[in-house]
Image (spheres, grey):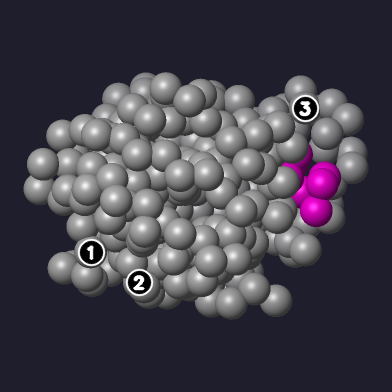
């Protein structure tokens, strides 16, 4: 079903949760896990090559090599703590030197993973950190689905998936993706319509749109209507209220198609949700093999 899962890691607790989640998903699907760590080291010789001697270059190369080896050792130590989980799953460790986001995107292009699993926050758990911004960029631009993992995540224990929709035709790509992951995770699907002051539908309009929607897409999912001040707050608060295991939010490059599918909605949900989030890009998404 799944062939490859890409896991960028910075050794933080959030990244380790993502790694464990990836191994659990891989164990259930037979996928290979590619563990990617990027050492964000600025090569001084790149900026002033004439200033440094060959000897300095060699010292810098040795330093980078030493850091790469230490990163490999740290990843092996993290994997060793996982015990039996890692024994059952094919995996590769890759350590690169450079800027995290471009290298993650390079690996996505080369490896064509079925999904990326990435931690929701960096090592210091502060918003706006380097790793936090890397996660935001990956969510915005990745062609494959991205799981943003906020805490311990076991794909085999996902019982409730929340999918917010405006019942638009624009949802067709999203629904195909949604049905695929519902099958993989074997979860109950909760269809959510968030009513806001600026995007309001009556109960009758919602019920009619819901009926057309589930019949058109052959969906088995209950309807839930939630009122809040904004789409992203409604999605996050509803997921908390029903104790959902996963929030599913499509992201979109274009603007003005519908209130729900703006890229900013997905990014806001990723930033504020207390639960793990699955996003996929409606514009770039490829079909499943």
Q: Earlier in the sequence, mark 3 or mark 1?
A: 3
Q: Which residue is mark 2?
A: 170
Is 118 or 12 nearer to us in this picture? Answer: 118
Q: In the picture, which quadrant includes the C terminus?
A: bottom right
Q: Which residue is mark 1?
A: 258
Q: Earlier in the sequence, mark 2 or mark 1?
A: 2
Is 28 or 242 nearer to us in this picture? Answer: 242
Residue 7 lies, with reference to residue 167, above or below; the image says: above
Query: Does residue 268 appear in this view?
Result: no
The answer to which quarter of the image holds residue 71 is top right
Q: Are marks 2 and 1 in contact (CB under 8 Å)?
A: yes
Is 125 or 44 nearer to us in this picture? Answer: 125
In the rendered structure, the answer to whether residue 81 lies left or right of residue 159 reads right
Q: Position of residue 287 (x, y in %)?
A: 59, 77
Residue 88 in the magenta stretch? The answer is: no
In the image, which disc is placed on residue 82? 3
Residue 170 lies, with reference to residue 97, above or below; the image says: below
Q: Position of residue 97 (x, y in %)?
A: 48, 53
Query: Does residue 173 appear in this view?
Result: yes
Mark 3 or mark 1, which is nearer to you? 1
In the rendered structure, the answer to whether residue 267 lies left or right of residue 107 reads left
Q: Residue at x 82, y 47 (%)?
A: 28
Chief SS of the magenta region: helix
């Amino acid at each position: 079903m799944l062939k490859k899962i890409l896991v960028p890691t910075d050794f933080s607790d959030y990244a380790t949760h993502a790694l464990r989640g990836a191994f659990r998903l891989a164990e259930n699907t037979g996928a290979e896990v590619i563990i990617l760590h990027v050492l964000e080291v600025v090569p001084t010789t790149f900026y002033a090559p004439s200033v440094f001697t060959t000897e300095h270059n060699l010292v810098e190369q040795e330093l980078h090599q030493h850091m790469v080896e230490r990163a490999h050792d740290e990843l092996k130590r993290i994997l060793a703590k996982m015990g039996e989980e890692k024994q059952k799953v094919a995996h590769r460790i890759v350590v690169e030197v450079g800027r995290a986001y471009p290298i993650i995107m390079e690996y996505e292009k080369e490896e064509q993973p079925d999904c990326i699993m990435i931690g929701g926050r960096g090592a210091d758990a502060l918003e706006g950190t380097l790793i936090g911004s890397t996660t935001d960029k990956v969510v915005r631009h990745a062609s494959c689905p991205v799981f943003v993992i906020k805490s311990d995540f076991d794909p085999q224990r996902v019982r409730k998936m929340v999918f917010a929709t405006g019942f638009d035709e624009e949802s067709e790509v999203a629904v195909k993706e949604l049905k695929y992951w519902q099958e993989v995770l074997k979860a109950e699907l909760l269809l959510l319509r968030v009513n806001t002051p600026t995007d309001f539908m009556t109960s009758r309009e919602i019920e009619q749109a819901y009926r057309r929607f589930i019949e058109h897409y052959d969906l088995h999912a209950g309807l839930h209507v939630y009122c809040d001040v904004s789409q992203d707050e409604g999605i996050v608060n509803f997921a908390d209220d029903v104790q959902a295991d996963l929030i599913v939010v499509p992201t979109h490059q274009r603007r003005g198609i519908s209130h729900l599918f703006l890229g900013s909605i997905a990014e806001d949900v990723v930033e504020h949700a207390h639960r793990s989030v699955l996003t996929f890009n409606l514009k770039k998404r490829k079909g499943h093999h």
